[in-house]
Image: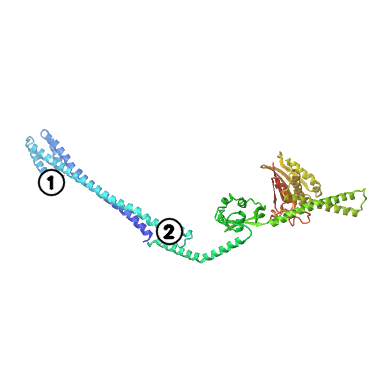
Amino acid sequence: MRIKSKLALGLAFLFCMIITLVVLSIFYVNRVSNDTDVILKDNYITLRYCNDLLADLDRLSGDTSVMAHFDEILTKQEGNITEPGEGEATRRLRYHFEEIKKKPADTTFYDDARRDIFTINQLNQEAIYQKNLKAQQTAKTATSWLSFIGAVLALLAFSFLLNFPGIIANPIKTLSEGIKEISNKNYSQRIHFRSGDEFGDLAEAFNQMASQLERYEHSNLAKIIFEKKRIDTIINNLTDPIIGLDEKKYILFANEAASRVLSINESELIGKYAPDVAINNDLLRNLLRTDGSVTPLKIFADNKESYFSKEMVKITADEKPIGEVIMLKNVTSFKELDLAKTNFIATISHELKTPISSIKMSLKLLEDARVGKLNEEQKKLVAHIDDDSQRLLKITTELLDLAQVETGKIQLERESVDPRSIAGYAFEALRVQAEQKQISIVIQQEADLPKVSCDLDKTVWVMVNLLSNAIHYSPEKSSVFIQLKKQDHSVLFSVKDSGKGIDQQYKDKVFEKFFRVPERNAGRNGTGMGLAISKEFVTAQGGRIWLETEPGKGSTFSFSLPV
């Protein structure tokens, strides 16, 4: 039977029970009402006639005018005879009344008439009593039947309410449990309903789905397991540590190299919540950070201190994040080479400064007329030598600064400095260079700027470097803007040029060592270290430096220092 038919039958059953109870109630109420109406209609009226007749009979002997009223009441009584014996008593009353009418003064028939009236009265009172008993019996019978039928119907309705919902709910519950088993990849789950309704059809469709899933699972399970083992083997054979996390930061895999550098067994990593494991592991805590730091991590591995660079790769599927992979690359050899390079640069730069200074001194002597006059050709050669030595001295100085930065031996002499003096020093240092290109330097500064805590020489060096670049890349007869303003708990220094700007692909690389923007640096003599050194100087003082640029609209280099 279909579910629709079951619901229709159930509702029809309830409807029939309600109709049955209503019909029986109406039937018995009508019976009691009819019995009551009979008493009122027949007997009670006769009693009223009897009372009126007795009253008139008492007045007949003294007032013959009452006879007409007596005759009228008696006539009505003759038309309302309902009980056995009442008709005969009424006829006797008529006979005696006729005799009284003939001889009103004769009291012989008065007593007979009074006895007739009493007889009629007694008969109707007895009838009322019997009919009242009958009405009470009818009411009791109605109460009994209605109580019995109501109890039976209540039991049937209660049983219906208990069992009928289960007919609908139990299959749904069974189906829900089956779906949960399927979601847990228990594809052997089956559902069986004996009913031939929609639930039976649904169970059959469910079983077909589970069968197909089970077949598909068995056909691909071996292949999936094989591929997983192969991937696990590849990951474990990698020499670089690799850790895989899901979107909730639970560790999916970690190769042997990762377990070794973390000093944690693989069994204590897989399936664990990474932040919980990181509570007792400083290295994992550093690996989970997403602050964008690119500084190599110093890790004790292979019985020595080693350096690793971290790379975090976000994994997405259908444009939704599903996890991330943390990869560590051993850069110890590169770090050692970089340190050797730094030491070499520092040594060579230091050694070069002495002969360069000697060359500069010799050039000064050559330019002195007291030593001897030079012809025009010799003056040009001396000028070229002076330019080359000046450029060589600048490169040497930058190399020494870079070596100082890389070795972490930046010596800071902090003091409280007025930001306007930093801009003023840079302006005076490059005023002549700007005038040669007819470039105006515009300083925009807020009033009541707080002082900053910094190393004056190094900060002025940064400002001069940024302003020198702005003047170089701005066209003639243009403007360069220096802006000073307070921003939260720091002071912002900005230098904006009027050049062509920098392509977005180079925006994040301009602060790297030795990097030079190709088209921007065409014909420009430089080492590509100025911005890298500037970044290190600013960062060492607790500030930050950044670039805002748009091709065709110039570039703005900004840095901030704490007040």
Determine the CA span between mark 1 and mark 2: 77 Å
Residue 191: where, in percent of width, then height?
A: 42, 61
Q: In screen coordinates, is 237 left or right of 431? A: left
Residue 45: where, in percent of width, then height?
A: 18, 41
Q: Which sits earlier in the primary sequence, circle 1 or circle 2?
A: 1
Q: Residue at x 77, y 49 (%)?
A: 468
Q: Residue at x 59, y 54 (%)?
A: 264
Residue 521 or residue 294, whichever sits in front? 294
Residue wearing tag 2: 175
Residue wearing tag 1: 84
From where the camera sits, is residue 22 visible? no
Q: Crowding at label 1, few (<14), some or many (≥20) Cα neighbours within 10 Å?
A: few
Is residue 450 depicted above or below 6 in this figure? Answer: above
Residue 44 or residue 400, whichever sits in front? 400
Q: Amino acid at mark 1?
A: Pro
Looking at the image, what colour scheme do you see? rainbow
Residue 302: where, in percent of width, then height?
A: 65, 56
Q: Residue at x 22, y 47 (%)?
A: 138
Residue mark closest to the camera, 1 vs 2: 2
Q: In screen coordinates, is 281 left or right of 184? A: right
Q: Quick one: SS at disc 2?
A: helix
Q: Crowding at label 2, few (<14), some or many (≥20) Cα neighbours within 10 Å?
A: some
Q: Amino acid at mark 2?
A: Leu
Residue 36's image quarter? top left
Q: Are marks 1 and 2 in contact (CB under 8 Å)?
A: no
Q: In screen coordinates, is 37 left or right of 303? A: left
Q: Quadrant of the C terminus?
A: top right
Residue 506's image quarter? bottom right
From where the camera sits, is residue 443 visible? yes
Q: Residue at x 15, y 42 (%)?
A: 126
Tally of marks: 2
